[in-house]
Structures are given as C-alpha cells and as structure tokens.
Amino acid sequence: MNYLKPELLAPVGDKEKLLFALEYGADAVYFGGENFSLRASAGNFSVAEIVEAVKLCRSYGKKAYLTLNIYPHDDDVAHMRTFLTELRLAAACLASNCPGTAPNGLPDAFIVADPGVLMLLKEVIPEVGMVGGSQIHLSTQASVTSAAAAKFWYDLGVRRLILARELSLNEIAQIRAQIPDGLELEAFVHGAVCMAYSGRCLLSNYLNGRDSNRGDCSQPCRWNYALSEAKRPGTYLPVEEDGRGSYIMSANDLCMIEHLGDLIRAGVTSFKIEGRMKSTYYVATVVRAYRGAIDAVWNSRSEGSAKDADLNTDTPIFDRVSTADPTDPIWIDELHKASHRTFSTGFFYGVPGTPDAYEKVTTSAHDIHGTEYIRGYEFLGIVSGYDVGTGLACVEQRGKFSVGDLIEIFGPQKEFSEFIVHELYDENMQPIPSAPHAQQILYLKTEKAVRPLDLLRKVKEDPSDIADKDSGEKQS
C-alpha cells in the first residue's frame, strides 16, 4: 500500500481562529456558514467571509472545506438554495480577482451528510464534483461503517468519507482495501465526542426543542441529572459521582496523538480535530501539538519496513496499541495544557468497556467517571509586536495576569519560553501591577524575542475550575 502523509485538518469557528489554525500548522481547515453547518452557536462565516477565508487559505497554500452537514427539513431547502447561489456568485467574483484560487473561488470541498443536500449542491453549483472543481466530502453524520456504503457514496460523487467514529482500526483497514483509490478516508483524532451514534441525537430536540441535527444542540448529555421516585414527587436523589456532579451520558475526549502511525497504516489520509466552538487558544495549542507529532512520525518512517508490511498479513494488526511510533512527550504535555476531559482512544482499538478493548484505552470512551472539563492553564494574551531594542512585546490581553506571575510564551515552533513578569505597562507606557481588562493593549518585558501571533498562558491557580463554555460535540 502506498501511504500518504496525512493531512492535518483543523476546526475554525471565526476569522481569528482561521488565522491561528493556518499559522500553527494546519494543512486544511473546515468551517461553516451562518446556517446549515451543525454549529449554530459558533461565530461562523457570512458569504463574503467564506470567500475571503478561501482566499486566505490559498495565500498559505492550504485548503478550505465548508460544512453543509445538517439534515434539512423542507423549509430549509429554499434557504440553502439561496445561500449556495449567493456563494457561487461571490466565489466567481473572487476567482476573477484572485488568480490561483480553486475554480470559481469556491472552497476545496463541501462537507455534506444528507443525499438531498448533495443533489442540491450539484444542481446549484455544477462545478462541484467535476475534475478540478470542489470535491464532496461525506460527513460522519452519514454513519459510513462498511465498504458497500462507501462505494454507494463514491458512485454519487463523494471523494472523501469522514468515517463513523464507531469503527475500529481493523474495520477501517478492511474498508480501505475494498474501495477505489480515489476515495479518501478521514477520521476524527482529537476532541469532544457526542454520546449518540455518529452524533445523531434527539435529546436536545425532546428536552428543549433545539434540533441537534440542524445545528442547535443544547448538549443535554452534559447536564447534571438526578433520580426521582414516583411516590415522592419533588424529592431528587443525586446519582453520585464526585463533588462536581453526575454526568451519566457524558463521553470522554478522543485523543490519538500517541497512535498516529496506526491511523496511517489503516489508510486514514486526513486527521481531523474537533472544536469549531473552542477557543483560539485551544485551536492553536492542539493544532501545534498534532503538527509536531505528525511530522515526527512521518519523518521517522522507513519505506518497506516491517510495520508497513503488516497490512498485507491475514492477521488483524490493530488488536493492541502500537509502540512503533513513540510520541515526543512535549506534544502530549501540550494537549494537557488545553481544556479537555479524560482522554480515550474511542472505538479505534475495539468497543470501549469490553474486556478485549479495555486494556488498550486510558479509560472507556463513555466512562461516567472523570468526564468533567480539566483546565490546567489560562490563556493570557496574543503577541501583536515586538521591539528588539527595548525587549518589549505588545500584547492584547485575553486573561488577567500580574507582575510576579510565571508565564509561558509559545508559537508555532516547538520551543517555548517561561519567565516571571517583572515589567508590565499599559498602552500609554505607564507601569501597571496587573492586566485585568479584556483585550486591553499591554507592553510586557520578555527575556527572549517573541513574534506576532505568539500566545501567552500560565498555570491556572485552581485547575478544578472546570467550566468551559466553548465546548461543542456535534461532529462534521
């Protein structure tokens, strides 16, 4: 089998996150318009912003994918037709003014789940699916779990499958062996996981009328529940778990950074990070870690090695966690510096919680213990400039810090610096003891030179403060 270096695909919920995903190492990004993308609460992009995002990605030599993965009702279809018509016109204008973009300035691919959306997309934008035009990628919401289903979608023009997260690596390898070479496989490798089958949940619809399959999930699986006994109305019995509450349906986070070689050998060519509703800091941190880990695995790989040949054997090769591709501990540590739940390898090594798979995962993917968010670090600010003569960095504040704090500054590169804040000034260059105001402009004396778009962080004083409003589990 001819292996390809996997694409690192990053989530972006707004223009700032787009810039940081590109700067910190993503090969491609995925984002949604203001509707139709299963992320109604993300910042999202207007039609004009979509074509500008495509233009920016082209300037970096990266790819842009647009999500259209809701399951629309009839009253959504006319609005989607209007949106696609406007997008095609705006993209054509971009292409005429920006040579080198994709044909008509469209995104490199559209991510869809519903057959009707696929047909509508081809009708309104005939260039989609044609040679040299935008591709069609099939969302994980479509639940592809077999080679037969993969071939069905391929015949309809799909050129990449975002695989159902319920598949094991063995099953992925079997699918890869039976499908056309022109059909790529993409899989989620990191982030929050919906507790429902392939993300198709009705709890939100039932409990508060917000349709998760049309982008408005209220995440009731993350709520705190109690039991009530029929003959004692008004008396609630807690389902005790720990001091933080009871999360009886809440899944752990997916993390495959230590098993990237296995994903490559199974035939996955795009590694997808979840998190269009996560913070800029989260996107930059996680993309940076996976960029470093992917490059290291790929650069250490030798052609014709025994581990490559394993795919030609009749024995399942993924019945254990591979130790063939050790991950630099620095990248694992980086992931722990972004908000997360307990990490798991999901279904990749078997059904979580079963005897055969239990030894291969950190915890069961749907273990009810330890599923609260862990936030060990605070995001403090973004570097916007640096004066070599004075050693002062200009910073836009995103979290409070003070003189005397121990902070870290990091960027896309592997190295980061750690130092104690001795000098801090406001935008008028007046000394200040702390930076308490969101997005205030500051000047900070650093011990080493820094670059624009480097980020500042510090250890959180109370890491048990786990609230995270930027979580969002519906997959694309």
Image (cartoon, rainbow, N blue to C red):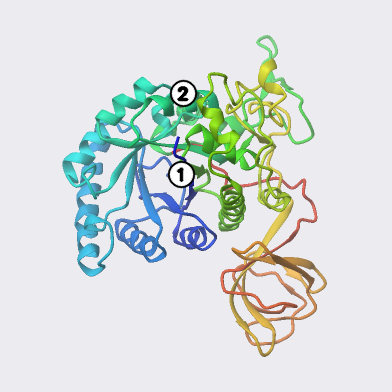
Question: Label 1 to label 2, Cα distance in Å?
Answer: 17 Å
Instruction: Name the residue nearer the viewer: 250 or 267.
Output: 267
Q: Is residue 217 visible?
A: yes
Identify the residue at horizontal 24%, vertical 53% (top origin): 87
Name which residue lies at 67% across and 87% down.
Answer: 429
Badge number at residue 4: 1
Q: Quadrant of residue 99?
A: bottom left
Residue 318 place in picture, x, y as percent: 60, 26
Outermost residue toward the right in this view: 404
Q: Quadrant of the C terminus?
A: top left
**In this view, 304 is above or below 458:** above
- Where's residue 148, x and y in %? 35, 20
In this image, 220 relative to 420: left or right?
Answer: left
**Dot 2 alpha-carbon crowd within 10 angstroms: few under 14, some 14 to 19, many 20 or more:** some
Label 1 or label 2, whichever comes before in sequence order: 1
| Lateral position of residue 263 relative to residue 462, left or right | left
